[in-house]
Image (cartoon, rainbow, N blue to C red):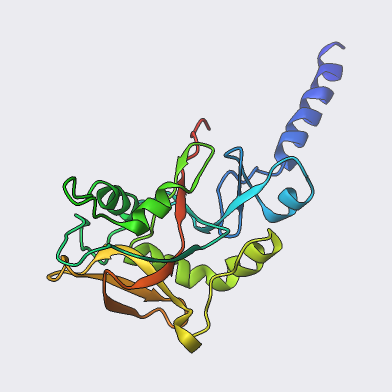
Amino acid sequence: MFIIPLMAPLCLLSASCDEHEAIDLDVHTGYILCDDGQVLDEDTYFAQDKRKAVAVVFAPQTEEHPVLAVLLDEISPVAFCDTLGMEQGTSCDESAFDGYANTTAMQNSRDQRTGKGSPLADEAFTYHYFWQSDYIPSVAEMGLLFIAKEHVNPIIVRCGGTPLSIDADGGGCWYWTSTEVEPNKDNQAWLFSMSDGSRHKTPKTNTYRARAIVEYNPLNIY
């Protein structure tokens, strides 16, 4: 007589668990990185007003790289290096997702005697939110951004940022990468076109825009 009544709640509990939808803990392209370090999907972000958008995710995490997000605003035209004949110490690897290491090397490449260095890296160093280090993407990371541009551009605009330029007229689509050109790394670095995904060897003293990106490394507690 006492066993049957106890089974009903257990059955209800079991049914409730079976019907519960799994929570998606992944971060997807188009999610918004906020000023407090949180990442929200588009609907959740625009339903609140406490957090401020900083960047938009353009590449989910893989075995090769963490979650990558592009900042809302651009770096104004600036030189990769303020003198020719000076190596910045990047990997020169066009297939590596190593923009952070490249940018760090660029920031540390300043000549102590002349003060010459990388104005581009100096600009990236000032772009920090929530203690995160923003950096100039490598050729490979720019490739990922190119693939996602149609998705992220409308969200960047909705967040009040400047969309990635895809206009080839007047060269507005060209952005610096943080990858120097092998074997002429003293003098050239790679530019990347958001119009067609091509890249171009360019003297490092030329001035072009750049788009800083940031890694998102969530604490995996699940």
Quadrant assignment, res 72: bottom right
Which x, y percent locates residue 173?
Answer: 47, 78
Relative to 20, residue 163 above or below: below
Asked whether, in this view, residue 176 is left or right of residue 112, the answer is right
Which x, y percent locates residue 93?
Answer: 22, 63
The residue lying toward the viewer, choosing from 114 and 145, is 114
* Numbered-mark total: 0
Residue 64 visible: no
Residue 105 visible: yes
Quadrant assignment, res 35: top right
The residue lying toward the viewer, choosing from 16 and 204, is 204
Which x, y percent locates residue 54?
Answer: 59, 50
> What residue sits 27% from the left and 76% below the top?
202
Residue extending farthest to the top is: 2
> What residue sits 21% from the left and 63% below the top?
92
Relative to 130, residue 146 above or below: below
Asked whether, in this view, residue 220 is left or right of residue 49, the answer is left
Quadrant assignment, res 139: bottom left
Residue extending farthest to the left is: 183
The residue lying toward the viewer, choosing from 35 and 124, is 124
Relative to 168, residue 122 above or below: above
Q: Quadrant of the N terminus?
A: top right
Asked whether, in this view, residue 142 is left or right of residue 172, the answer is left
Which x, y percent locates residue 46?
Answer: 76, 52
